[in-house]
Amino acid sequence: MSSSSSSEEFQTTFDTVVACAQMAEQTYDALCKNAAASSQRRTRRYICRNREEANQRLVQDYFEENATYQGYYFRRRFRMFKGLYERIVEDVTRECSFFQQGYEARGTPGFTPLQKCTTTFRQLAYDIPPDALDETFRMSARIAGDGLHFFCKTVIQFYGLKYLRNPTRNDILQLQAHHASVHEFPGMLGSLDCLHWAWENCPTSYHGQFSRGDHGHPTVILEVVASQDMWICIYDGSAPDSYFEVRGMPYKYGYYLVDGIYHEYALFVKSFICLHGSRRKKFKRAQERARKDVERAFGALKKRWFILKKPATYLGKEKLQEIMYTCIMLNNMIIEDKGRVICAFDEKETIPET
């Protein structure tokens, strides 16, 4: 009896061990299959985008001698004349290696400078998401996004000395002469105003810093001096003296026309609130008429670069600053190319530091 009982217990234990081993083997096989499937899903699939054909079509459409779209269509879609655009592409390609055409590991040629710069301009001019450029320009969202980043950095670094400069004495005199002849305000340097750029993807930690009571969402504020040129720096007394006289009264520094939201500073000239008398009414009408320059400048800036008109989808405030500066410099370059610039740049003239 004892021998039979021991044999049955041994057989039961053996069957249990075998069953456990089979279950472990099945579990291991299932894990291996799941890992292989997930690894296969994570593998990047190569897409033959045929970028050479896309580049050839771009050249035929805009840059050949008998291009399909030229003149009015080129200026509307690129926001500038072809000569200025080609000069910008040449300068950016020379200064930044990202825009230079290279070769991939498989030996195939990469994107041309025209393709990279054109996708960047489409993002600035039409606020097109990077992944929406794949069908037209055969460019992935990552390369299109990197193109916008490197383009802004290169433009600021290469053109910043000229188009983001502080006003020199010659600039101040030219501004005062222009506004005195057009608006009949002697000593006027321009109009001061601000633009609110909605920040859709503002981090939660920045909400209190970039929110105001009159806006229900975070915004990035651009405050510039504008006539038809756009000036970044606000005159704070560090610029050279700009002596002028009004009815025999001498003044050492110029002034800006502002609205009622600004503080009562000596360099800010506001319109009258209480209109007692014809002289105050006349001054108020003239002041508001002259301040239309800054409103038109902001309107032209947002209409020319739609990326400033729609809510920003970028996370870093440094990137927003780079995009804003790039749009302002391109705006000034377009005005200069059309021959409507007020302050001509002189490389020999010393620029004061802030």
Image (cartoon, rainbow, N blue to C red):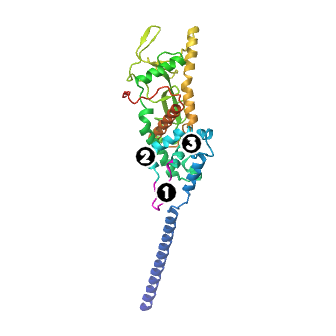
Q: Quadrant of the C terminus?
A: top left
- Element under label 1? loop
**Within the magenta stretch, is there residue 108?**
yes
Q: Which residue is mark 2?
A: 96
Q: x and y percent of residue 221 in the render?
A: 49, 32
Q: Residue at x 48, y 38 (%)?
A: 326
Q: CA distance from mark 2 to mark 1?
A: 18 Å
Q: Which amino acid type corresponds to the residue marked 1 in the rendered image?
A: Pro
Viewer-closest of 128 and 196: 128
Q: Which residue is mark 1?
A: 109
Classify residue 282 as left or right of residue 158: right
Corner quadrant of residue 154 = top left
- Element under label 2? loop
Kindly report which numbered mark, 3 or 1, lies closer to the viewer in this rendering: 1
Q: Which amino acid type corresponds to the residue marked 2 in the rendered image?
A: Cys
Q: Given contact means CB atoms under 8 Å apart, are the residues at marks 2 and 1 in contact? A: no
Identify the mark at residue 127; answer none if there is no mark. Answer: 3
Picture layout, residue 50 above or below residue 337: below
Q: Residue at x 56, y 9 (%)?
A: 279
Closer to the chain start, of discs 2 and 1, is 2
Q: Which amino acid type corresponds to the residue marked 3 in the rendered image?
A: Asp
Q: x and y percent of residue 86 in the render?
A: 51, 42
Q: x and y percent of residue 337 in the render?
A: 52, 33
Q: CA distance from mark 3 to mark 1?
A: 28 Å
Q: Residue at x 57, y 51 (%)?
A: 137
Viewer-closest of 288 and 168: 168
Q: Give the magenta-colored segment's residue range.
A: 102-113
Closer to the chain start, of discs 3 and 1, is 1
